[in-house]
Amino acid sequence: MRRSTVLWILALLLTLAAAVWQEVTGPTFPIRSRVALGGQLFPVKLVRSWSTGDQPIELAISDAAVHGRVRWRRYPTAEAWQVQPLQRSADVLRASLPHQPPAGKLEYQVELARGDERVILPDRPAVTRFKGEVSARILVPHIFAMFLGMLFSARAGLEAIVKGSGRRWLGTVAFVLLLGGGFVLGPLVQKAAFGAYWTGVPWGYDLTDNKTLIAVAAWAMAMWRAYRRPTARWSVVFAALVTLVVFAIPHSMWGSEIKWE
């Protein structure tokens, strides 16, 4: 197998690993668990991000003896908890959380009971964030550009490590993709979802925006050095490592949030 092919495979694996990790560890990834009631195990999925209308809560629990309720309040506040019973429809228990404006958050827990058995899910209240509807015409190109930017970044870094001659053009492609995906399409996604084009430095602490800023800055510096000194390669390695690290940070950490008070 050619060295170039091996390096592309390694770059793809690194990119996929970082992308999956940032998604499944993020604060908006659904909570999945199993609840034991009446000698049976039932799978539970609690959503932590929603856009259009009230957020549904649906629990596939076929045991008709199981009933429950949902308690919720705005987050972050110390307001009194609102309580809503779960309604049974065949094998599903249902309720809904009231729609909030973009960047509005609610915290909630589900309480289930069967006879003397009681279960509260999760142990600490789940926090769900509401957002505006984002057009697929913006979102899909944004995701595509960022993923390819991560891929070319990793590939450029590997090329520099093995002293390959293609690190400069690979780095250039990575820089252009991250710049376009993060600073052109990214703000459009942010505006549609949360009502602001940019919530990173110097106006906020949104890690999604700030980590994009760090990655693009690292590649801008790497390309400046690479075009001044064609033999320079460690700046490319450094930019690739920075990009890998920042994009492994859980997605939507320190994201847009309404301060209800």
Image (cartoon, rainbow, N blue to C red):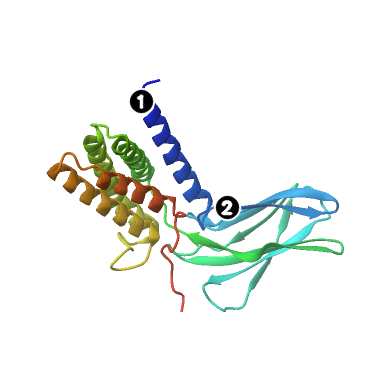
- Figure check: 185 above or below 206: above
Q: Residue 185 at x, y = what percent?
A: 30, 48
**Residue shown at 49%/64% (left/top)?**
100
Front label number (1 vs 2)? 1
Q: Secondary structure at mark 2?
A: loop
**Residue shown at 57%/79% (left/top)?**
78
Q: Secondary structure at mark 1?
A: helix
Whether residue 185 sits left or right of residue 44 in the image: it is left
Is tag 1's residue or tag 2's residue first in the polypeptide sequence?
1
Q: Nearer the viewer, residue 169 or 97?
A: 169
Q: Which amino acid does the dot numbered 2 rest on?
A: Pro
Residue farthest toward the left in the current orientation of the protein: 228
Res 30 label: 2
Examine the image and state in which quarter residue 157 appears.
top left
Q: Are marks 1 and 2 in contact (CB under 8 Å)?
A: no
**Residue shown at 45%/54% (left/top)?**
251
Whether residue 127 sits left or right of residue 68 in the image: it is left
Res 3 label: 1
Residue farthest toward the top in the current orientation of the protein: 1
Whether residue 51 sits left or right of residue 227 in the image: it is right
Q: Residue 257 at x, y = what percent?
A: 43, 67
Q: Residue 237 at x, y = what percent?
A: 30, 44
* Separation of marks 1 and 2 at Cα, in angstroms: 39 Å
Q: Residue 162 at x, y = what percent?
A: 32, 34
Q: Quadrant of the N terminus?
A: top left
Examine the image and state in which quarter residue 240 appears.
top left
Q: Which amino acid does the dot numbered 1 rest on?
A: Arg
- Figure check: 139 above or below 51: above
